Image (cartoon, grey):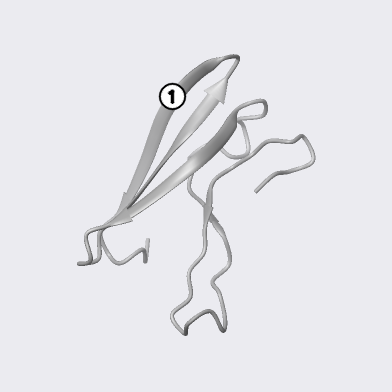
Amino acid sequence: LSDASNDHDIALTSSNNVGETWTPPVLLNSDPGSDAGREDHHPTIATDGDGTWVVAWISSLAGVHTVLATRSVDDAGS
C-alpha cells in the first residue's frame, strides 16, 4: 500500500471462500502512520501448514536496510 506521501507499507488480506470475498487489509508494519520516508518492500510469506504464518520484508530509510518480520500462530487470524 502507498499513501499520498509515497510511503509504502506491507498489508495482509485473506479470503476463506476461494477469492469471492476478502477481508479488509491489515497493515503489518507496526509504524505505518509515523514512518514517512521509510520504504517497506519485498515481502515474503511462509507457512508451516499448521496455522503459523510468517511475513518478512525489507524496511529502508536513508540507505539503511533492515529485515522486519511478523508472525501469526492462529492461521492468520491475528
Q: Which residue lies furthest to the right in this view?
A: 4
28 lies left or right of 45: right
Identified at 69% across, 44% down, the residue is 2
| Crowding at mark 1 (Cα within 10 Å: few <14, some 14-19, many 20+) | few
Res. 63 image quadrant: top right
76 lies left or right of 25: left
Q: Which residue lies furthest to the top in this view?
A: 63
Identified at 79% across, 40% down, the residue is 4
Identified at 40% across, 34% down, the residue is 68
Q: Circle 1 sits on which residue?
A: 66
Amino acid type, callout 1: Thr
Res. 41 image quadrant: top right
- Find residue 74 and report its horizontal and vertical position in percent: 27, 65
Identify the secondary structure beneath mark 1. Answer: strand
Identified at 47% across, 85% down, the residue is 17
3 lies left or right of 72: right
Q: Quadrant of the C terminus?
A: bottom left
- Residue 68 vs 9, above or below: the answer is above
Q: How many labels does the image show?
A: 1
- Residue 53 vs 74, above or below: the answer is above
71 lies left or right of 24: left
Considering depth in this image, is 30 or 38 the residue closer to the camera? Answer: 38
Res. 75 image quadrant: bottom left
- Find residue 57 and report its horizontal and vertical position in percent: 45, 38
Considering depth in this image, is 36 or 49 the residue closer to the camera? Answer: 49
- Find residue 24 and report its horizontal and vertical position in percent: 58, 67
